[in-house]
Image (spheres, coloured by chain):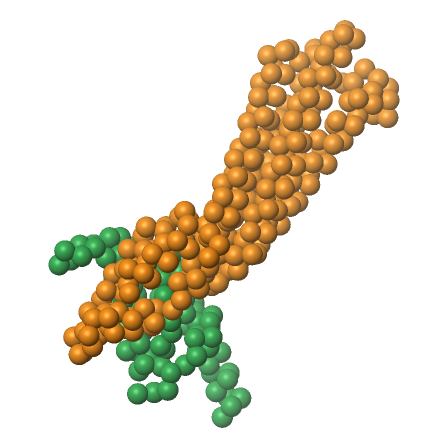
Chain colours: A green, B orange
């Protein structure tokens, strides 16, 4: 497993990461966090509670939408990405690619 | 262990909005995490302790959520305040177009008891507009930013309240000036003075604007200060 990254290093990127995970398909908070860990190879292992204020904030901004679902007698809040969220994700991907490319060019 | 964590979070979240939803999500998350750890061989208390430890301190979560929610509420209050300010435009237009010209030779000759009230109303409403617009811009910037500090959100709530009080005072003084001015015009026999019904309608409208601004400010103060009880 890769070395874990400090939560502070994720600041400023968490929203884009969450949008990218939810863009793959509707999911509840626990599943989103699991996917984030899995897709990052365990590198992004942040305090789990920080995900919920971020999800709520993205929903208030209209980038995510959510609803309660019932499965196996359990009530869960499932999040899905909105059209506005997809546009924001595409924009943030572009910004990240430019940033990462520039850092790579300097460090290489 | 999970129950204790949820109880602490419930206490910290106070009467903040979205409390029930967040608690339900957190409970589901912690129970799912503990269940998975149990499946991996941990005993229940140990699994619950590990799930809670991975989730992070409840105070941190509550503060993060409350700051962002308060910033959103303040942003909405500032928006309502700007709408209330816009409501003064038709009042100004009505008074300008339908009130007869002053019977004295120049603005400097305006009776003192009217002059200071008119100036105070104008400065108060203008001040409310400037502060309200600044709060709106700041709150909008922080609304979707991760981790808006609760202290900043509270400061913005106080600023929006100050602006609302200025607007309400401006509305009250302005309405009083209009009533007194019109009464004086009628005493002096100025033709085409506003009727008592017109003056009452204008006064009621500005009163409503002032009360709306105060209600919006009270709402944002409640969101900002009741959102997080002291630990």
Horizontal side of residue B95 vs A7, given as left or right: right
- Of all residues, the one furthest to the left in this rendering is A72
Of B150 and B145, which appears nearest the observer? B150
Q: Residue furthest bottom?
A: A108
Residue located 66% across and 31% down the image = B169
Q: In the image, residue B147 lies at what x, y percent?
A: 48, 63
Q: Which image quarter is the N terminus of chain B in?
A: bottom left
* Residue A79 seen from this side: no
Total numbered labels placed on residues in the image: 0
| Residue at image point 40% right, 66% down | B57
Instruction: Pick the residue in front: B117 or B5.
Output: B5
Residue B195's place in the image compared with A27, above or below, is: above
* Percent position of residue A25, x then y: 25, 65
| Residue drawn 24% across the image and 53% down it | A68
Whether residue A6 is visible, yes or no, is: yes
Residue A44 vertical position relative to residue B15 in the rendered view, above or below = below
Residue at x 79%, y 25% (from the top left corner): B115
Say left or right for B200 vs B146. right
Give x and y (percent) for residue A26.
25, 62
- Residue B40 lies in quadrant: bottom left
**Is B205 drawn above or below residue A16 in the view shown?**
above
């Amino acid at each position: 497993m890769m070395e874990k990254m400090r939560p502070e290093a994720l600041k400023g990127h968490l929203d884009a990461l969450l949008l990218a995970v939810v863009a793959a398909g509707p999911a509840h908070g626990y599943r989103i966090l699991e996917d984030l860990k899995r897709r990052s190879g365990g590198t992004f292992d942040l305090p789990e509670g920080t995900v919920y204020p971020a999800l709520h904030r993205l929903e208030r901004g209209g980038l995510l939408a959510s609803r309660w679902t019932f499965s196996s007698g359990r009530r869960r809040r499932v999040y899905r990405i909105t059209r506005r969220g997809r546009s924001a994700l595409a924009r943030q991907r572009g910004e990240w690619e430019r940033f990462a490319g520039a850092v790579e060019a300097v460090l290489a | 262990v999970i129950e204790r964590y949820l109880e602490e979070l419930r206490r910290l979240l106070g009467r903040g909005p979205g409390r029930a939803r967040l608690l339900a999500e957190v409970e589901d998350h912690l129970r799912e995490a503990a269940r998975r750890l149990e499946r991996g061989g941990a005993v229940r208390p140990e699994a619950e302790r590990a799930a809670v430890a991975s989730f992070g301190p409840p105070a941190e979560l509550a503060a993060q959520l409350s700051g962002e929610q308060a910033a959103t509420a303040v942003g909405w209050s500032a928006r309502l305040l700007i709408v209330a300010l816009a409501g003064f435009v038709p009042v100004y237009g009505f008074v300008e177009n339908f009130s007869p010209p002053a019977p004295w030779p120049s603005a400097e000759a305006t009776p003192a008891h009217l002059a200071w009230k008119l100036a105070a109303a104008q400065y108060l409403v203008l001040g409310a507009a400037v502060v309200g617009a600044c709060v709106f811009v700041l709150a909008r910037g922080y609304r979707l930013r991760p981790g808006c500090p609760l202290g900043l959100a509270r400061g913005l709530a106080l600023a929006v309240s100050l602006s609302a009080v200025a607007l309400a005072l401006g509305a009250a003084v302005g309405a009083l000036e209009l009533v007194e001015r019109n009464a004086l015009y009628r005493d002096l026999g100025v033709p085409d003075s506003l009727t008592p019904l017109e003056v009452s309608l204008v006064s009621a409208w500005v009163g409503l604007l002032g009360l709306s601004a105060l209600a919006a400010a009270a709402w944002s103060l409640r969101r900002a200060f009741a959102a997080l009880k002291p630990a």
